[in-house]
Amino acid sequence: MRASVAVVASTLLLLALLVLGLVAAPNRSHTQPAQLLRISKPETAHVHHASQPDYGDRFGDGTPDFLRLDDPADRDAFRRWFTLLAEVEAAQPAQKLPAEINDCAGLIRFAYREALRAHDPTWMAKQGLQSVPAIASIEKYQYPSTPLGASLWRVEPGSFDPSDLNDGAFAQFADAKTLMNLNMHFIGKDLGQARPGDILFYRQSQQNSPYHSMIFAGLSQLQPELHEPIVIYHTGSIGKSKGEIRVLRISELTNFPAPRWRPLAGNSNFLGIYRWNILKEAN
């Protein structure tokens, strides 16, 4: 009798273990992957949605919101890279400059585009930089991985519309006047308003190419001993010469021998300080 009870008890215990095993096993082998799949679908969709370009133009200035640097850290990184790259090129012998840097707009286009790249070891080697600056790359996007590809410059007036992606409203080239009118916004004529990466524009009507630009770099990143803001610009061709990149202290520029180049409010040739649309803030 006792043996029979023991057998029955053992059988019941075994059945209980089997039942528990059958309940637990799907959670380990079948149900868990299915549940992970169901969870991962919304997560994947959410990431995909977040990566969709913003085709809006909240300022109505023709610059798509997917290009605007909304994060202050990105704006700071752009300013620092843009001005540093201009300064690095200014330190190069003229014969080593990239072919596209042959006037003021060429220098601006080069520094702008390269500031938006991923600054990895391959890029550093291509630029011939000996050390890596302690500046983060922009996180929102890296050139040319945007819906516009390499066509960064707006060349046709109007607010942004998704059709602009393919209708020639953007191009890989823009002259100084087009950069100023369609890719930047006016800040003022008081140098106290200028921030690193802003552009000083001039119109010298007596010259064949009347629009000229200078990069306001703020304090030098290569020559901190200067102790005052600098501007960097390419002269364009001078006679038979291809011209050169020059660096001037603000005090030198405001006292320049030719008054038409002085960045002063009373100088009609000085058009003012302009800032990139991708840096525009709501306030």
Image (spheres, rainbow, N blue to C red):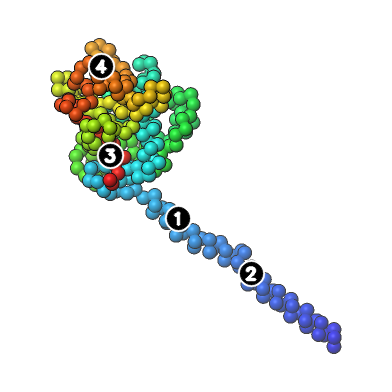
Determine which residue is flagged by label 4: 237
Quick one: label 4 or label 3, which is nearer the N terminus? 4
Residue 163 lies, in percent from the top left, at 24, 46
Nearer-the-camera pick, 61 or 102: 61
Q: Amino acid at mark 4?
A: Ser
Residue 208 horizontal side relative to residue 103, left or right:
left
**How many angstroms separate mark 3 from mark 1 (CA)?**
32 Å
The image position of residue 232, as x and y in percent, is: 32, 24
Marks 3 and 1 close (CB-CB < 8 Å): no
Kindly report the distance in space between the C-alpha atoms of the residues bearing marks 2 and 1.
Answer: 28 Å
**Residue that numbered label 1 is attached to:** 44
- Name the residue type under label 3: Asn
Mark closest to the chain's N terminus, 3 or 1: 1
The alpha-carbon separation of the residues under discs 1 and 4 comes to 54 Å
- Quarter of the image with the N terminus is bottom right
- Looking at the image, which residue is at 49% across and 58% down? 40
Q: Nearer the viewer, residue 41 or 85?
A: 85
Near mark 4 (Cα within 10 A), the count class, few <14, some 14-19 or many ≥20, is: few
Taking depth in this image into account, of 224 and 7 the one nearest to the observer is 224
Mark nearer the N terminus (4 vs 2):
2
Secondary structure under tag 4 reads: loop
Secondary structure at badge 2 equals helix
Q: Earlier in the sequence, mark 2 or mark 1?
A: 2
Q: Residue at x 21, y 26 (%)?
A: 264
- The disc at residue 277 is 3
Q: Quadrant of residue 274?
A: top left
Tell me which amino acid carries mark 2.
Ala
Q: Residue placed at 35% from the left, 42% from the top?
A: 69
